[in-house]
Image: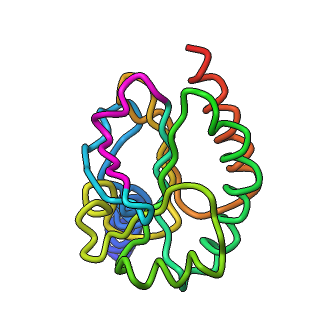
Amino acid sequence: MKRLTLLLILGLVLSTSLWAVENDGDKTKKGQTAPDFSVMTLDGEQFKLSDMKGKVVLVNFFATWCGPCMKELPELEKQIWPRFKDKNFKQISIGREHSVSELKKFQSTKKFSFPIAADPKREIYSKYAEKFIPRNYIINKEGKIIFQAKGFSQKELNEMMKIIEKALKE
């Protein structure tokens, strides 16, 4: 009886652990059509994802208080944006739970050259995820998600560059 109880408890713990791994806040899956959104950038330009068909798009979610985000954004500025901005590529970084005024103050000190937009109520973010930032989504010319990840590492950034390069050639 003790052995059966132990096995049942072990089974419950394992299944709960597997559920936790699966439930990592994602609302999208690689291969699906990216959820559409429209947002005004800090520069006053309208960015509508469905209008980007035919281009490779990087959608990045960040917050100004997020340490990994603050490590990632300068790398996007140095490694991704200059390499691809003059190709058939669009990038947008979206400040999760930030107002336009907060992001304008942030941008005035950081001076990023890629488009930035505010998502103060998580309206855009909530189409893609429930939790965790930074998050990156690469969307191919057909509007399908071909890469999605959370967190930041140079290894992941290198992978993103390879995926963007390949998608631009397709």
Q: Position of residue 26 (x, y in %)?
A: 36, 56
Residue 129 against residue 98 in the figure, above or below: above
Q: Determine the residue positioned at 41% across, 36% down.
A: 145
Is 52 one of the magenta-colored residues? Answer: yes
- Considering every residue shown, the one lying at the far top of the view is 170
Where does the N terminus fall, quadrant-wise? bottom left
Query: Which quadrant holds the C terminus?
Result: top right
**113 on left or right of 117:** right
Magenta stretch: residue 156 in it? no
Q: Residue at x 72, y 44 (%)?
A: 82
**Number of numbered discs on residues:** 0
Magenta-colored span: 45-55
Q: Residue at x 32, y 41 (%)?
A: 49
In the rendered image, residue 135, in percent from the top left (x then y), is placed at 49, 59
Up the image or down, 131 lies above or below 80; here it is below
Which x, y percent locates residue 36? 25, 43
- Depth check: give the residue in front, 12 or 157: 157
Image side of residue 2 versus residue 88, left or right? left
